[in-house]
Amino acid sequence: MTMQRMPMTVGQKFDPTNPKHVDKVLSAIDPAQYGTGWKIEHYDQAAGKLYVTRQDAVTSVEAGTRKDEKVARLGPEYGPGDGEKAAKRFESIPDFAGYVMTHYDSYRAIAHLTKLSPDEIRCRDAIAIVVAAKPWEVQVSKRRGGGFHVRLPKTYTPSKHDAKLNEVVTTAVGLPGWYSKIDVPNLSMEIIPSKPPTFPGMVPYPLDRVRELNTQDQLLYGWSLPENGDDPGEYLWFDWGDGPHGLLQGTTSSGKTVSINGILTGALAAGMELAILDTPAKSVDFMWCRKFVRPGGWGCESSGHALAVLDGIYREGNRRAAIIKAHGVQNITQLPPDVRQGMPRILTLADEVAALIRPAEVIKGLDKEDPRYLKQQEEGMIRGLTKLLFLKLTAEMRFTGLHVLLSSQVMSQNTGFPTELRDNSSNRWLMGPGANDRQRNMAFNNPDSAPKFSDHPTLLQDKNAVRGTGVAELPGQPTRIFKGLYASTDDLSRRLVQLGVPTYPEEFSSPSYLEVQRAIHGDDVEVKRNLSGPPLANDPDAGALDQNGNRLTGAAAAAAASKRHAGV
């Protein structure tokens, strides 16, 4: 044991024989800073100084194994709960300036003191608060290249502490963009300086690998926002097996069409068939791929054509369902390969779907015999039937390989978009960095868990980087920010032709007049579509002429007829 001696200024009126004077002076000594057990050695009245002594509980302070470390041997007055007292005591000694207690073991009567930089101390103390530990239970040292190595205490729990640790890393310890890597089993953590994650101005669609990167089961849809600025990001896919239908929402100029074009390209390259429904005005966005749609799959000339396409797809689903049942299996994927070969997956894109199913506007004051009244009644019926077929397709036909991708600017019950249709579409995308809370609530099953662009201010400040971005919520995957893959429609079309994707003459792409009438009025209308394109046997307008006076046949004649019927 060593003897400690300390002078105290008490004045000349101090009486060392007076117990009250003695108790008052000794009780003024802070035990947390100076320890306990002080006794009067002698009193110098002329100088007004009192000298007190104690047997120090620290027998020695030795050099540690490293040059920046010291080892203190503890006396019996330091128990398991005296760590804070020991830390305060050691860190107040002038000779130990810059040293902090980094280890405390009262059972072995030992404490370690380490010289840490202010940055290391700040890192250690901030992490200790988050994980509810004592500062000396968190070990911190600088790492080469910047940042810190951290040894976490046993109080650390990933589910409880990771989010707060990430906040500490980017605020109290480092800067926005810094990140951490935690080895949970070994309780070790690396804090790494970096820049905030972002996107390049444009991520090109990998047309040279389009067939390699897409299958009929999984389609490429975008590029991920990396977790940190040191990672480049990666391609992203969605799986029809996890979710048979999709819902893509986005405002004007949000990159919605670019993302859709990429999905359509992957589907066609993988051998899927394609059908497209849209309003006549908006269909210009997809004219580039009209030649690739399945015969009778272009539902963009009118609401009646859109209904006829859906009707044809639904009938195909029933045909496939009968085959699946006949083979005693539950899903198209379980059919024998030779049977399934003739039944590729079919993707039906419904752009501006809200406009296709929203109740028709009613013009009041029209006589019931007025053609305008009759037309609005039929338009209302068409939209109602279209909504019904969407519901039936998405609810009943997932096992037949029929998939629907719905797209619109605004989706809500106020615009006639039914909740059931939304619920049937489990793949969700919301395009645009400026989506508001209402749009997020409509787009996602769990909007609170979806990342927000506001958490990435650096990305938001770069107009090129944030262009064409959105958030994807897909079954079985983390919800994430992504960027759509870009290629011009000319390049997309050219590559699909190079790959040998089937194309069809434009006159075969739209449903015939009779197919439209059957979709509206039911099976009383007989239709015999032959996809090879000869004249329809029961086409009432088979003798129509084109602008050059040539006789129209088949789907071309039917299309001409449909344009002459105001009811469609």
Image (spheres, rainbow, N blue to C red):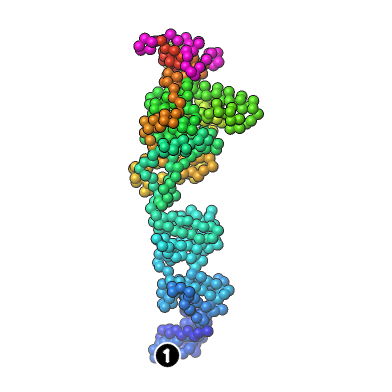
Residue 547 part of the magenta segment? yes
**Residue 413, image x and y in percent?**
48, 31
Q: Quadrant of the C terminus?
A: top left
Q: Total marks drawn? A: 1
Q: Residue at x 53, y 13 (%)?
A: 525
Q: Which residue is mark 1?
A: 44
**Residue 407, image x and y in percent?**
45, 32
Q: Nearer the viewer, residue 145 or 12?
A: 145
**Residue 25, image x and y in percent?**
47, 82
Q: Does 149 sit above or below residue 463?
A: below
Q: Residue at x 42, y 18 (%)?
A: 507
**Residue 201, image x and y in percent?**
35, 43
Q: Residue at x 49, y 30 (%)?
A: 271
Q: Does 25 sit above or below residue 186?
A: below
Q: Residue furthest right?
A: 328
- The rendered magenta stretch, by its main secondary structure, is classed as loop
Q: Counting other residues with Cα less than 10 Å from the Cα at mark 1, is it few (<14), some (14-19), or many (20 or more)?
A: some
Residue 44 visible in this rendered orientation of the protein = yes
Residue 277 visible in this rendered orientation of the protein = no
Q: Residue at x 37, y 42 (%)?
A: 466
Q: Nearer the viewer, residue 506 or 133?
A: 506
Badge 1 marks a residue whose secondary structure is: strand
Q: Does 549 sit above or below residue 488?
A: above
Q: Nearer the viewer, residue 411 or 413?
A: 411
Query: Which segment did they paint magenta?
Result: 521-550
Residue 474 part of the magenta segment? no
Q: Which amino acid lies under the numbered mark 1 shown in the image of this protein? A: Asp
